[in-house]
Image (cartoon, grey):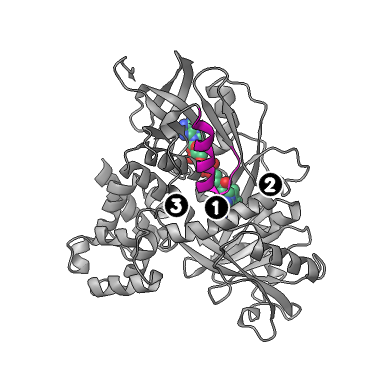
């Protein structure tokens, strides 16, 4: 069925293709400046790269080796801002970096960390320092060969929740957010974009008009240009797969580890979901079409070997309880080596052939907010609707207004307001939803009033919220993107969640 835009339908100011972190960030910023915005995402929000990252809000210590000072400075500045914008889903983390003589000399690490500590102004996280593993508690899980190292600060983010919160905020400010909607065709007609959208749930198509188009299709950015829009472009994207494994917790404590490999790459081991350790990542050039990707057996071996070089507790392939992989859509700067390709982003504005088209190549989760600002600054001269002042630097994301005293004080308040909440649930609700936890609890006065328990501490009330407010439509959306409860529930519980979501969304 084709529904066509009638001449009276008002064009959107901006049609954004891609519901990853960059598309969602641009939608939020643009609608806040007064533009009318439509965002389409072919699958669930954050279905691809933006849920497959290492989940670090970081300057990127290793990028200093490639002289990416602009990117690192911008990322470090953003790190501070983001930690304030969403203190529920982001938190500071200390990273332990053992010195290994075989890889980089200690003076080089010290110099890099000094730069990292000082490259941006107004940094509030604790600075780096040298540590002796023979006396420091972070040395306990390490092999005795490692006696010295450093510790420095960065941040952690629940990546797919960051995307959803940006989309929610955009939606609450008036943007039209449409997951499961694919742009199948678009062309310039009389100075506007005329775009055909396919609703992937119903199979229907609809034609809409927009003054400008943003191509935030991540790994699909070049294909969208060449195949869907039929627009030649000299810039290209380099797809580089990165994979992670999850194993039962290998070490105690809140700190993460960053290990140097003999191939000069680095691999992180990060405390994950209370009971687990997240290990990643790899850099594998990807030549096939974008889409769902998985980890290869040799990547699992590589990641196990990377941590086994340092930890006393050895990890083997059969210990892996879950893995995920994603494609980095990197701007192709013709580097010979996949690890060396720039992690900076390039915005390409095409106004020569009529209605503006902005394509985004590259970008990090960490820099998404600044990327959105840059994108709108670039569009503003040709799209007055987004010419308003930038505003996102100090505005919290939904749930981020947790009040005085940080997370711990907010948790204490929640526990006082709802003493009947199981403590682990109070903690999890606050970590995922911040102040919106109160919206989920609503008028309930007991665990029973939160509905049926589907598994662990997941109740039907929480799933209803995810369906009503966060566009969840499948068990996978609930278990692996809105949360990571998939790691904690057994198969029977997951089936219960799937049945409930199906019945609710039928
Ligand atoms: C292994 C790995 C580790 C990483 N680690 C970090 C990290 O620790 N910190 C950090 O800051 N960054 C990290 N990154 C980088 C970061 O994840 C990405 O730069 C970022 O997520 C890219 O977001 P995006 O919105 O551009 O792309 P995506 O998240 O892929 O979004 C693009 C979306 O466009 C949609 N789309 C495509 N075509 C269409 C169409 N025709 N119609 C509708 N929708 C369409 C897709 O479905 C997709 O969801 C990592 C990346 C990888 C792969």
- Quadrant where the image shows the N terminus: top left
SS assignment at label 1 = loop
Of badges 3 and 2, the one in the foreground is 3
Separation of marks 1 and 3 at Cα, in angstroms? 10 Å
Residue drawn at 55 percent across, 38 percent down: 218
Outermost residue, bottom direction?
135
Spot occupied by residue 139 in the image (x, y as percentages of width and height): 66, 80
In the drawing, does residue 409 fall left or right of residue 506?
Answer: right
Q: Quick check: is the Cβ at mark 1 less than 8 Å away from ligand 1?
A: yes
Note whether residue 55 is visible. no
Separation of marks 3 and 2 at Cα, in angstroms? 26 Å
Spot occupied by residue 95 in the image (x, y as percentages of width and height): 61, 69
In the drawing, does residue 289 fall left or right of residue 397?
Answer: right
Q: Earlier in the sequence, mark 3 or mark 2?
A: 3
In the foreground, 384 or 177 = 384
Q: Which residues are magenta?
A: 361-381
Q: Which residue lies under the disc numbered 1?
A: 366
Name the disc covering residue 162, or none: 3
Q: Quick check: is the Cβ at mark 3 less than 8 Å away from ligand 1?
A: no
Separation of marks 2 and 1 at Cα, in angstroms? 22 Å
Q: Which residue lies under the disc numbered 2?
A: 284
SS assignment at label 3 = helix
Examine the rendered structure and indicate whether residue 183 appears above or below residue 144. above
Bin the neighbour count of mark 2 within 10 Å (Cα to Cα): few under 14, some 14-19, many 20 and up: some
């Amino acid at each position: 069925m084709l529904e066509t835009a009638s001449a009276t339908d008002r064009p959107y100011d901006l049609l954004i293709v891609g519901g990853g972190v960059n598309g969602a960030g641009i939608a939020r910023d643009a609608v806040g400046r007064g533009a009318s915005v439509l965002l389409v995402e072919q699958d669930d929000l954050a279905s691809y790269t933006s849920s497959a990252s290492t989940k670090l809000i970081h300057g990127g210590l290793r990028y200093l080796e490639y002289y990416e000072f602009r990117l690192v400075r911008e990322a470090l500045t953003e790190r501070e801002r983001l930690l304030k914008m969403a203190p529920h889903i982001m938190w500071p983390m200390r990273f332990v970096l053992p010195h290994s003589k075989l890889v980089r000399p200690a003076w080089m690490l010290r110099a890099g960390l000094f730069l990292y500590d000082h490259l941006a102004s107004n940094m509030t996280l604790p600075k780096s320092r040298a540590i002796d593993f023979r006396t420091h508690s972070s040395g306990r899980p390490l092999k005795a060969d490692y006696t010295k190292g450093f510790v420095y600060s960065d941040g952690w983010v629940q990546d797919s929740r960051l995307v959803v919160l940006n989309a929610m905020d955009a939606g609450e400010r008036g943007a039209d957010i449409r997951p499961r909607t694919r742009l199948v065709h678009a062309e310039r007609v009389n100075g506007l974009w005329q775009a055909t959208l396919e609703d992937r749930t119903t199979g229907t198509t609809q034609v809409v008009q927009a003054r400008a188009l943003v191509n935030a299709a991540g790994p699909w950015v070049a294909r969208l240009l060449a195949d869907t829009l039929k627009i030649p472009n000299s810039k290209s994207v380099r797809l580089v797969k990165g994979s992670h494994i999850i194993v039962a917790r290998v070490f105690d404590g809140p700190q993460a580890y960053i290990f140097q490999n003999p191939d000069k790459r680095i691999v992180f081991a990060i405390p994950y979901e209370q009971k687990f350790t997240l290990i990643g990542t790899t850099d594998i050039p990807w030549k096939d079409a974008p889409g769902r990707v998985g980890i290869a057996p040799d990547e699992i071996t590589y990641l196990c070997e990377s941590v086994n070089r340092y930890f006393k507790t050895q990890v083997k392939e059969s210990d892996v309880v879950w893995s995920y992989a994603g494609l980095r859509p990197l701007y192709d700067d013709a580097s010979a080596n996949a690890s060396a390709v720039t992690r900076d982003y390039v915005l390409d504005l095409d106004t020569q052939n009529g209605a503006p088209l902005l394509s985004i190549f590259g970008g990090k989760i960490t820099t998404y907010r600044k990327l959105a600002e840059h994108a709108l600054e670039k569009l503003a001269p040709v799209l007055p609707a987004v010419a308003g002042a930038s505003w996102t630097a100090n505005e919290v994301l939904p749930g981020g207004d947790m009040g005085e005293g940080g997370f711990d004080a907010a948790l204490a308040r929640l526990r006082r307001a709802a003493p009947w909440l199981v403590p682990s649930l109070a903690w999890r609700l606050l970590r995922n939803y911040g102040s919106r936890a109160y919206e989920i609890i609503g008028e309930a006065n007991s665990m029973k009033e939160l509905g049926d328990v589907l598994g662990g501490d997941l109740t039907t009330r929480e799933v209803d919220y995810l369906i009503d407010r966060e566009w969840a439509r499948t068990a996978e959306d609930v278990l692996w993107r809105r949360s990571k409860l998939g790691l904690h529930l057994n198969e029977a519980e997951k089936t219960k969640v799937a049945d409930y979501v199906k019945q609710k969304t039928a």
